[in-house]
Image (spheres, helix red, strand yellow):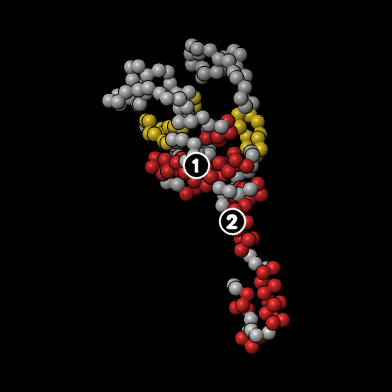
Amino acid sequence: MEWRETILSQYEHSPRIMGTARAMGDGLDTAPGIELFTREVMDIRTAGTWGLDVWGRILGISRTIVLSGDDEVLGFAGSELQPFNVGTFYQPRVTQAYTLGDDAYRLLLMLKAAANISDASVPSLNRLLQFLFADRGNAYVLEVGVMKIRFVFEFDLQPYERALILRQDVPPKPAGVGYELFTLAYPAFGFAGSGLHPFNQGTFAQGGPVDAYFV
């Protein structure tokens, strides 16, 4: 409300009352506070540490998460009926708790918020990836089989981005659908007219993606 609207008409010519009302109006102007609150809290894209913690409480997501450790394990080919990495020298993978920085926490919050409102169709997931990684390069989702999708990033992911996307409870996806993560951070070669094979699986295709993760 503009401060002049608070003055009764019989006092509108009183210099003292008008001066007092003007000073109070200037001192209590809420516009700068609203702009600051919007930038630091309401807009998740620009929110600071405290604002992101508010979003975390709203969405029920802690800044501290548990991820699998990066330690390497040793297994054997020809393990018969044993699953991979359950050889003689196998050691269980240790889980570790991490407190996320602002950028990592922001990504986690946006992914979880998207999972709450998205219909998890391929077009919706592609729009989400284009929004989240618009300034990084191409990112998209492919349907690669029965009940399986593939997240493809044509740029290198930060370690925390890869770790978050590989958590099965984080990326928005249809219920019961598995997924895999590919990063293609280099120019690759393939053929048109590859039939039912995915791109880059032609006769002269060299290797595979730089990094492939299966969940």
The disc at residue 38 is 2
In depth, the one of 183 and 215 nearer the eye is 183
Residue 58: where, in percent of width, then height? 59, 51
Which SS class for mark 2?
Answer: helix
Q: CA distance from mark 2 to mark 1?
A: 20 Å
In depth, the one of 59 and 19 nearer the eye is 19
Image quadrant assignment for residue 143: top left
66, above or below 202, in the image: below
Q: In the displayed structure, does residue 124 sit left or right of residue 197?
A: right
Residue 108: where, in percent of width, then height? 56, 41
Q: In the image, what residue type sits under mark 1? A: Leu
Residue shown at 69%/77% (left/top)? 19
Q: Which residue is mark 1?
A: 132
Residue 149: where, in percent of width, then height? 41, 33
Image quadrant assignment for residue 32: bottom right
Residue shown at 52%/42% (left/top)? 111
How many marks overall? 2
Residue shown at 48%/13% (left/top)? 80
